[in-house]
Amino acid sequence: MSLAHLAAASAYTTPPLWRILTKTGYFVGLSGAIGATVTYAAAVRPSLRATESAAADADVLRGRSARHLAWAGVVLLISGYFQLAGRVARAGKGMPFGDALAPSRIADFLNAPAAKGAWVAQGTLYLLQNLVLLATAAVLIPLFAPAARRRLDALALTGLPLSLAVTLIAAIPATAPDGADRILDLVLDQVHIVSGTVWIGGLALLAVLAGARGRLGADAGTLWADLWRRFSLVALICVGAVLTSGLWMSWRHVGAISQLWSTSYGFFLLIKILLVLGMVAAGGVNQFWLMPRIAQARRTDPTSSLVHLTLHHFPRVVWAEVALGAAVLAVVPFLAGSARSEAGSPPAVSSGSIFAAGAALVLALAASLYGTARAAEALARRQDPTAATTAAATAAA
């Protein structure tokens, strides 16, 4: 069945181009700001402190991190403005997107009175969100200046909670949530956004940093081995959060497996699921194939082979994950509506059995991720047979 036929049969409305571009751009901006600040704080900064890396290598990575964070601030600022204009266009009946870009239109939207029954005006929440967005950009953009890079740690750690607040504030409802399901929708939607942006944005930062390998010394492999190890833990947590929240959201919007190919919403959701699974598979290559070899090289040859693995092989897989992540962000604007509504299925209603099944799935997922981490550690600890033979021959001599 063609996509056009699906859209016509299910009354699915393809979002306009400006909506696709503004929403994708906004999530790119969030990924850049949230992912880069979290990854710098959780992986890059600790690795630079924990390993005895050469001062020149540390300066290279700090400088490139600073420029990446500064560009993330620029992208967040620009995409945030267009996202706000998109909200204005959707709030006005038939308002062209070009008209919604006018500051006067945006001001009217932000100053609109609260709706009946709301505890606060929706525009006030969006105003607060965009003030925090401006503050985030104001913290990150100065990192273009060499003088500001001396305060990289302080600025990155300040930008981290601010960038998180940008998405969290937007999720605050202006009216009281109607039931536990709605509260879970709000919470798990933000879990999905934050974990996804950390995962994609963190991969992008590390891929960019790895591009500086030509300026690093021969001993940079040790630093990068530690950096990849730290980020692998961050990525594993993000995978668990993305899959857990994704299961809930999929159940809420899809009433049957067949709706993944019989409705337009389900069709785009299926594409997103396949792309995410591709990212998970690429991460599995890193976890089970590259990380054990990096650990072995770190024990036996901390120079050439370690550098080759950490700065040549590993980044190639990471760039593939970044490409898949960008494709995921491009699909997100098409997930409008619900497969249930398109197919005429009743809305999803939670119950004790649903929560029990969900808890069992989450526990099974947590156990599988824990097993994945332990299996990867066991592979990393396993001694290279060649190295063992060499060691035995040396001892016998």
Image (tube, rainbow, N blue to C red):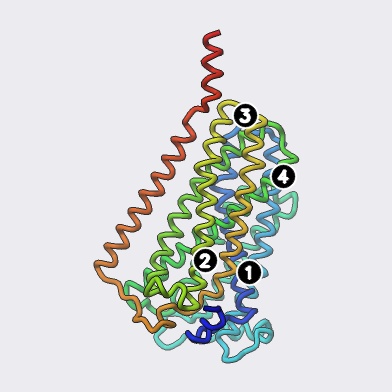
Instruction: Tell me the element at label 3.
Output: loop
Q: Nearer the viewer, residue 129 or 38?
A: 38
Cβ atoms at labels 3 and 1 below 8 Å apart:
no
Q: Nearer the viewer, residue 101 or 136?
A: 101
Residue 241, horizontal then vertical, whole percent: 44, 57
Q: Nearer the viewer, residue 257 or 145?
A: 257
The CA distance from mark 1 to mark 4 is 26 Å
The CA distance from mark 1 to mark 2 is 17 Å
For disc 3, the neighbor class at 10 Å (few under 14, some 14 to 19, many from 20) is some
The amino acid sitting under disc 1 is Gly
Q: How many marks overall? A: 4
Instruction: Tell me the element at label 4.
Output: loop
Q: Quadrant of the C terminus?
A: top right
Quarter-wise, where is residue 222 in the image? top right
Cβ atoms at labels 2 and 4 below 8 Å apart:
no
Q: Residue at x 35, y 57 (%)?
A: 362
Q: Nearer the viewer, mark 2 or mark 3?
A: 2
Instruction: Tell me the element at label 1.
Output: helix
Residue 266, horizontal then vertical, whole percent: 47, 74
The amino acid sitting under disc 4 is Ala
The amino acid sitting under disc 3 is Pro
The CA distance from mark 2 to mark 4 is 31 Å
Disc nearer the start of the sequence (2/4) = 4
- Identify the disc placed on residue 212: 4
- Identify the disc placed on residue 272: 2
Q: Nearer the viewer, mark 1 or mark 2?
A: 2
Outermost residue, bottom side: 93
Task: Give the residue number, with chain letter if any, for mark 1.
Answer: 25
Q: Nearer the viewer, mark 3 or mark 1?
A: 3
Q: Residue at x 61, y 75 (%)?
A: 20
